Image (cartoon, rainbow, N blue to C red):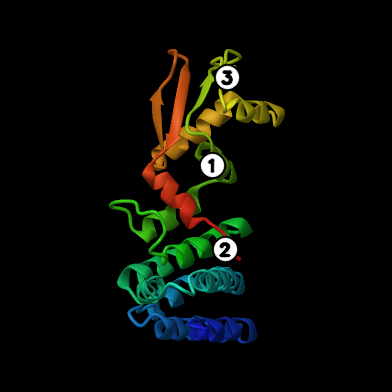
């Protein structure tokens, strides 16, 4: 497969070799790779120093690697390949690229930068789980605001269809529950019930999880929403 993102290669190389020209160079290279993106003024506004350039570069590097890996995975599926290639030329993707760049320059968290690149790449995959009414940009903004603890609980909720805890020292008894191992793991890691609830309620606020009635007034149950499953799919690593 030819490198479909050669303009990105050039932009990243320019960024590394000529940081003083990066603002203009990366704008033009992105505009070449994604013809509908008019980003010159936006990038000039936001990317004012070397560290910011580097965060944008890192986001693009992750996107590039993940996008290429997706292409390799779908090498025998021409329809999927065409859909991915068309999507990265769309106005929706252009908006997502700008959103990811804006979030990247505000973050010093390397893992968050990687997530932004992965969301961009996976968002192009027509096989990723749909989430009605949500565009890729909204997930970019969510990823930028979620903490490491939020992401951890998001993944744990995905592995357990229904988690029940009681407040304080009184936990809802689940002797036969397949989720008991999760509770034990949480206890071993000294994860306080209140902290667990805090992350769950944050996920509810993002529309990534839903609260269900518990077995008692002091017990709560949470599950991922369709949007939560969609975000997990967007965070998938292929490289």
How many other residues sit within 10 Å of disc 2, few (<14), some (14-19) or many (≥20)? Answer: some
Of pointers 3 and 2, the one earlier in the residue sequence: 3
Q: Which residue is mark 1?
A: 150
Viewer-proximal residue, 108 or 206?
A: 206
- For the point 58% across and 61% down, the residue is 114
The residue tagged with tag 2: helix, strand or loop? Answer: loop
How many other residues sit within 10 Å of disc 3, few (<14), some (14-19) or many (≥20)? Answer: few
Report if residue 239 is visible in the image: yes
Left or right position of 74 against 174: left
- For the point 45% across and 39% down, the residue is 203
x then y, percent, for residue 216: 44, 13
How many other residues sit within 10 Å of disc 1, few (<14), some (14-19) or many (≥20)? Answer: some
Viewer-proximal residue, 17 or 179?
A: 179
x then y, percent, for residue 39: 39, 77
Q: Report the disc number at residue 176.
A: 3
Mark 3 → mark 1, Cα distance in angstroms? 27 Å
Viewer-proximal residue, 237 or 136?
A: 237
């Amino acid at each position: 497969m030819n490198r479909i993102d050669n303009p990105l290669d050039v932009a990243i190389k320019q960024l590394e070799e000529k940081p003083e020209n990066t603002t203009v160079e990366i704008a033009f290279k992105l505009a070449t790779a994604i013809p509908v993106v008019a980003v010159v003024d936006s990038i000039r506004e936001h990317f004012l120093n070397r560290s910011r350039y580097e965060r944008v570069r890192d986001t693009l590097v992750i996107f590039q690697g993940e996008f290429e890996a997706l292409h390799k995975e779908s090498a025998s599926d021409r329809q999927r390949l065409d859909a991915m290639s068309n999507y990265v030329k769309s106005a929706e993707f252009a908006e997502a690229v700008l959103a990811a760049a804006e979030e990247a320059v505000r973050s010093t968290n390397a893992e968050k930068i990687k997530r932004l690149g992965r969301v961009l790449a996976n968002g192009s995959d027509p096989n990723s789980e749909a989430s009605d009414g949500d565009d890729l940009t909204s997930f970019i903004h969510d990823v930028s605001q979620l903490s490491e603890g939020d992401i951890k609980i998001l993944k744990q909720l995905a592995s357990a269809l229904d988690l029940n805890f009681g407040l304080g020292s009184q936990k809802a008894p689940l002797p036969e529950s397949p989720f008991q191992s999760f509770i034990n793991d949480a206890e071993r890691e000294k994860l306080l019930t209140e902290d667990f609830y805090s992350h769950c309620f944050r996920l509810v606020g993002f529309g990534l999880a839903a609260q269900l009635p518990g077995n008692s007034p002091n017990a709560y149950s949470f599950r991922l929403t369709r949007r939560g499953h969609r975000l997990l799919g967007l965070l998938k690593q292929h490289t």
